[in-house]
Every structure is written in C-alpha cells, then in structure tokens.
Image (cartoon, helix red, strand yellow):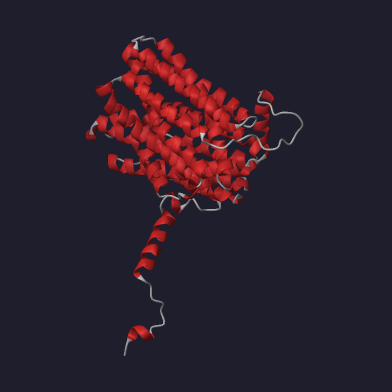
C-alpha cells in the first residue's frame, strides 16, 4: 500500500518550502517595506551617505583642535560651542519645518552643511590652525544640522503609511548607528594615510550626493492650515509646540521616557574610569574602545533584526519595555567584573535603545498632526542631544562620590523604578497603540 496516497496531511513542494522559509526569515529580519516607496528610498539613501561622512568630521574637528592646543579642555569647550546652536536652531527649525515646504528646507540646510564642510577643508588645507575659526565653523554646522533634523524626520510621515512608520524609523536609526561605528573607525584609518584636510573634503563630497537625493524628493508643502493667514515660525509658534506637548500626554511621556533612560542610565562619562580601574587587566585602551563601541554595535544588531518588533501595534508598551530593558542591561553592566560580560550587557542596552528609538519616533510621527510634526521633532532633537550630556554631569559626580560601578548599577535600577512608576501612574503611554 502506498502510504503517501492515504496520508491526510498536505504535501509541500520543495519550492513552496523555500518560500515559506524566506517568509519566516523576513518576519524577524529588518522590515524593508518602506524602501519599496521611491521617495522614502531616496531620503534613506541620502542618510547612508551622511551617516558616515558626518562622523568623519565629528572625529576630525576634535582631533585638529587637540593637535593645535594639546588640551582636552579646548576639545570640551568646542563640544559646548556646538551644543547651544544645535538646541536653539533645532527648536526654531521645527517651527520652520511646519511653516514651509520641508523639501526646500532640506535643500537649503544640506547645502549649508556642505558649504561648511568645504570651509573646514579650506582652513585645514591652508594650515590656518585657528581654534576660534574651528569653533565658529562647528557652531554654524550644528546650527544647520539643528534646522535640518526636524524637517528630515517629520518628512517620513508624508512618505510612508502609518503602519510602516516604525519600520522606517528602524531603517533610519540603523543607518545612523552604523555610521557611529564605521565613521570613527574609518577616520582612524584614514587620518594617518590622507590627513585631516582630505577627511573634511570627503564629507563635503558626500553631502553633495545628499543634496542631489533630496532634490529628487517630491514637494512637501504644509498641509491645509487650520487657522487664517500664512504660517509663521517665531517664538510664539515654538511655545505653541510646547503647549501641544503638555496637552497630549502620550507625546509628553515619550519624551520623558527618553530623558529617564538617558539621564539616569547613560554611563559613558564613567567609561574611562572603569577602563582604568575595573577592566585594566584587559588593557586600558582595549577596554575603553570596547565600552564606547558596545552600545552602537548593539543598536545596529537590533536594527538588523528589527522585523521581530517593528510590526508591533502597542507602541506605548514597546517604549516602556525597551526603557526597562535598558535599565536592566545597564544594571548588569555595573555589576560585571568581566570586560566581555560588560560588553554583552552594553550591547543588550544598545538593542533596547534601538527599540525605544523606533517606537518613540513612530509615536511622535503618528500621534502629532502634520502641522506640529516639525516642532515635535525639534524638541526630540534637543532631548536626544541634551540628555546624554546631562548624564555625563550626573554620572561623573555620582562616580566620584559612590564609585563608578555603584553609580552605574544604581542608575540602571533608578531607570527601571522611575519608568515603571510613571507608566502605571499615567496610563496614556501604555494604552497607546496604532
């Protein structure tokens, strides 16, 4: 008797099995559906170029300042010189992004960043060796970046449907995190070979590709205004953005979630001390490099496997879970005697940070109206830039008082306690879904 004929179970052809396996792979690998949309694909492609190029300049500027002055204090002063313009112009840029064609704003600001990179190249090529000029150029560059970032992110909601916003954020965040890993490594390799001027020039040329890609985007003018007269972009409009956040609890909570995670749980200021004291037997230089690289590498891994979470609909719970997971991983890092275990915990923290970024970004794009998205992204840029710097001050002080490992572990525990308390005290975030 032929058992195959009497079997009641359906038979699967080999090709069908392979297709099923591929579908299974796609369920947990990165969700690339947004890349099927030409406009989003152009915006994302331009991000690939700038993610690495911008990191070349981010390494070259402090390197050049240190070469001129021999002082880390001047390097720190330059970082502060770039922070204030970034904060001011990100807030203003968000209001501008809500009042004019976002494609046009992206063209203007990307061109401005490209011109600034050319000026960086000229001052280095001519041997000017002026810290004042470098700090002015850095401030101008960060001002243009502050104007650019809100418009770039707010445009995503006009290029992909709501159900693909999380996937689009995962694609963009993965590219940016990859740039933070590849860019500094590439700069370290290229500086001894081609020198600092050429590093600036590479960034400038890369930005020309970005300008071309943005030029190919469709027009993105403001949607029909809700009030009379043209939209403006002044102090009143920026204040209106903050009032809008205060009236929409889910938006406010998404910002608070990031502040909680970064301020209490970002221990990078303690990495040098940990590398020197706790992980010195592994080699201080190796330990320091691994500690700084671990979180971005974890974020990239999280992005590559973002198909496992990017289709989730309960965006609020995903943010809460990601922040709690970040706190748990940071706590594990603080308790680790082994460098390799510490790197694993930091990488896990990076994965959690990627999940948090994806869904916080999706909430900002979906919960806010189009006329407010630019201002929401401006505040988001300020929070992302300011939170880790506040964490540096807090952790540096706590590490001096309590010790580095105690400060790190205590910060991680504080993240979990505060986030869970906030989530259950104010239900708006845990109830939010698309």
Nearest to the observer: residue 161 or residue 388: 161
> Which one is in front, 236 or 251?
236
**Residue, x 31% and y 15% (percent of image)?**
67
The location of residue 8, given as percent across then percent down, is 41, 82
Residue 418 image position (x, y, % from top left)? 53, 41
Q: How many marks?
A: 0
Quarter occupied by residue 119: top left
Instruction: Report the front residue among 342 and 123.
Output: 123
Left/right placement of residue 272 relative to residue 243 reads left
Q: Looking at this view, name the residue that lies furthest to the bottom.
A: 1
Q: Could you say where residue 300 lies in the image, as x and y percent from the top left? A: 39, 42
Report if residue 59 is visible in the image: no
Residue reaching furthest right?
Answer: 228
Q: Is residue 187 above or below residue 303?
A: above
Q: Is residue 221 visible?
A: yes
Q: Quadrant of the N terminus?
A: bottom left
Identify the residue at horizontal 39%, vertical 9% (top origin).
130
Up the image or down, 231 lies above or below 322; here it is above
Q: Is residue 412 left or right of residue 158?
A: left
Compared with 83, 419 (above or below) is below
Percent of width and height locating residue 410: 43, 38
């Amino acid at each position: 008797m032929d058992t195959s004929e009497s079997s009641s179970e359906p038979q699967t052809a080999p090709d069908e099995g392979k297709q099923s396996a591929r579908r299974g792979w796609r369920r947990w690998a990165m969700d690339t559906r947004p890349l099927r949309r030409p406009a989003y694909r152009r915006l994302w492609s331009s991000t690939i170029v700038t993610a690495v190029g911008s990191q070349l300049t981010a390494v070259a500027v402090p390197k050049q300042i240190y070469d001129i002055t021999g002082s880390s204090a001047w390097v720190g002063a330059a970082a502060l010189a770039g922070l204030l313009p970034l904060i001011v112009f990100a807030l203003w840029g968000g209001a501008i992004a809500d009042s004019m064609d976002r494609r046009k704003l992206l063209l203007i600001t990307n061109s401005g960043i490209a011109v600034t990179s050319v000026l960086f190249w000229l001052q280095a090529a001519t041997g000017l060796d002026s810290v004042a000029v470098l700090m002015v150029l850095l401030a101008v560059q960060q001002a243009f970046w502050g104007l650019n970032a809100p418009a770039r992110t707010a445009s995503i909601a006009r290029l992909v449907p709501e159900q693909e916003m999380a996937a689009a954020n995962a694609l963009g965040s993965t590219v940016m995190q990859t740039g933070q890993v590849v860019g500094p490594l590439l700069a370290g390799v290229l500086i001894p070979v081609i020198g600092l001027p050429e590093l600036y020039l590479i960034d400038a040329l890369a930005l020309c590709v970005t300008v071309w890609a943005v030029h190919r985007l469709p027009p993105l003018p403001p949607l029909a205004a809700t009030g009379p007269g043209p939209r403006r972009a002044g102090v009143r409009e920026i204040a209106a953005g903050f009032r809008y956040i205060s009236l929409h609890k889910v938006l406010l909570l998404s910002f608070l979630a990031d502040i909680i995670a970064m301020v209490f749980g970002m221990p990078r200021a303690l990495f040098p001390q940990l590398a020197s004291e706790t992980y010195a037997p592994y080699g201080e230089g190796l330990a320091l490099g691994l500690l700084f690289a671990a979180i971005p590498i974890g974020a990239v891994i999280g992005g590559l496997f973002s198909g496992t979470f990017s289709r989730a609909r309960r965006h609020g719970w995903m943010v809460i879970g990601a922040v709690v997971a970040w706190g748990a991983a940071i706590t594990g890092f603080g308790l680790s005697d082994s460098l390799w275990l510490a790197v694993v915990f930091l990488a896990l923290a990076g994965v959690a940070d990627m999940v948090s970024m994806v869904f916080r970004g999706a909430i900002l794009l979906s919960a806010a109206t189009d006329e407010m998205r630019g201002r929401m992204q401006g505040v988001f840029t300020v929070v992302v830039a300011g939170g880790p710097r506040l964490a540096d001050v807090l952790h540096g002080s706590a590490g001096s008082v309590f010790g580095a490992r105690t400060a790190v572990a205590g910060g991680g525990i504080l993240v979990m306690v505060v986030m869970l308390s906030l989530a259950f005290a104010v239900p708006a975030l845990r109830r939010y879904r698309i």
